[in-house]
Structure formats: structure tokens, C-alpha cells
Image: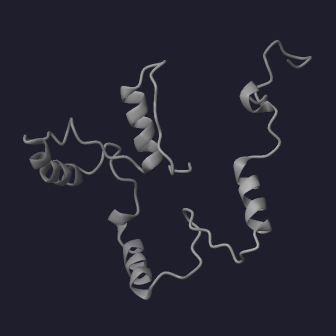
Amino acid sequence: MSATTARPDPFKPAARVAGQRQDVWSIVNEAAAASPVQPIVNMGQGFFGYNPPKFALDAAKEALDRVDCNQYSPTKGRPRLKKAIADAYSPSFGRALNPDTEVTITTGANEGMLSAFMGFIEPGDEVIIFEPFFDQ
């Protein structure tokens, strides 16, 4: 606690990480730099070592010119996308899936995993995650 308030310091790290000197990415970067095999190709998300092909650049430029492509989608997903997913997976379940109540669209793997965990896991439940796993 600071001398001027009775509240704990809001920036104090949790006890489980307070003793750690480096984050995992600093350790990984040091190991990569020390590797006898160079250059290291980063296959991680968002680290391309090449330019996209012309058709991809052209499509991106075209999309930037369209107003309907430059806004957030509906939070619960586009209805047409949800219906297409429900239609595609209904045969696998042997019944019609309701796109409004049984299909969830997320803005990536992190949100998808968080939604699944928050929706189905109770405190004290065991969760098993296989390696390799999403590194976020």
C-alpha cells in the first residue's frame, strides 16, 4: 500500500508472477538469437517474411474502397454466415441447428476459447489442453 492511500498498489503483479524476471517471449527470442541455425524463420502469427501476392493486395485495395467492408460486423455474427454454418453442420448432428441459439461467431480463437470456457467450465473443473497449442 502507498503511504497516501489505504488501497493496495493497483500495479503490483500477482504473487504467481512477481518473482519472474523475463516474459516467455524474451526467453524465446534469446534462444532463437543463440541458435547456430540462422536465419530463424518466425512462423508465428503476423510475422511474414514475404510480400503478399498481387491478387491479395488487389483484393485488399478493393475491399478498402467498399464502405460495407470497413466497419465491425454485428457482435453476434452476420445472420447469413450463421445460417450457412448451421446448414453445413446440421447433417453432422442429424437435426437442424438453430443459427440464432446454437451457432456462435467469435473474432478469433482467443474469444472463442474464452467464450467456451466461460460458458461451460465451473470453478474447480479440470481442463486438459494438448500441445502444441495456440500461443496467445
Count of picture labels: 0
Q: Quadrant of the N terminus?
A: top right
- Residue 122 at x, y = what percent? 42, 20
Residue placed at 47% from the left, 44% from the top? 130
- Residue 67 at x, y = what percent? 36, 66
Residue placed at 33% from the left, 63% from the top? 68
The outermost residue toward the top is 6
- Residue 100, relative to residue 36: is it above or below? above
The outermost residue toward the bottom is 54
- Residue 129, relative to residue 119: is it above or below? below
Residue placed at 56% from the left, 50% from the top? 135
- Residue 118 at x, y = what percent? 42, 29
Residue placed at 44% from the left, 43% from the top? 111
- Residue 88, relative to residue 103: is it above or below? below
- Residue 23 at x, y = what percent? 74, 46
As drawn, is 122 to the left or to the right of 50? left
